[in-house]
Amino acid sequence: MTFKEQIAQDNRTIFMNLDEFSDIHTVNGVKMAVQIDSNEMIEREKRNQYRQRGLYADGIYIKELLIYVRAEEFGKLPAVGRVIDFDGKKYTISDAIDEDGIYSLCLEANRTGGK
């Protein structure tokens, strides 16, 4: 088995394992294994302090999510600015990276109130 084949197998059986790290979510109408990473999102926000994130302005705030999905399940790496449906809510992709077959997708949406 080559190194790349081993990574692809690990992506399926370890990193996106539904019993350990991932849960089933609906992305653009397709149910797939997804990891939501709140801790990494906080770290990325700290590194990008030039941008005011999540602050309220007249009852509107930015809701952010960082998710990981398998490239095989998702399809082509989405472009920044593309709108996707995540669990029935619309989000704009603010960053998209292919990390050896796992996509790291930063999602943003304007929300009102506390929802």
Image (cartoon, helix red, strand yellow):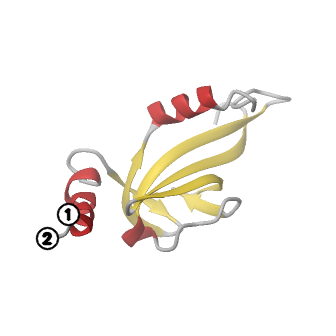
17 relative position to 92: left or right: left
Q: Which residue shows up at 45% across the image and 69% down it?
A: 74
Q: Which residue is mark 2?
A: 1
Does 4 appear above or below 90? Answer: below
**Residue 22: x, y in percent?**
31, 49
Q: Residue at x 49, y 63 (%)?
A: 27
- Callout 1 amino acid: Gln
Q: Nearer the viewer, residue 67 or 112?
A: 67
Whether label 2 touches label 1, CB < 8 Å = yes
Q: CA distance from mark 2 to mark 1?
A: 7 Å
Residue drawn 80% across the image and 30% down it: 59
Residue extending furthest toward the front: 2
Please tell me how crowded label 2 is: few (under 14), some (14-19), or many (20+) other residues with Cα within 10 Å: few
Q: Quadrant of the C terminus?
A: top right
- As drawn, which residue projects farthest toward the right? 58
The residue at which mark 1 appears reads as 6
**Residue 52 location (% of width, % of height):** 75, 29
Packing grade of label 1 (10 A; few <14, some 14-19, many >=20) is few
Q: Residue at x 72, y 32 (%)?
A: 113
Residue 28 in the image: state x and y as whole percent: 54, 67
Residue 5 drawn at (x, y percent):
22, 69
Q: How many marks?
A: 2
Query: Up-down: is 66 above or below 7?
Result: above
Left or right side of 98 for 21: left
Q: Amino acid at mark 2?
A: Met
Relative to 78, say whether 36 is above or below: above
Secondary structure, mark 1, is helix
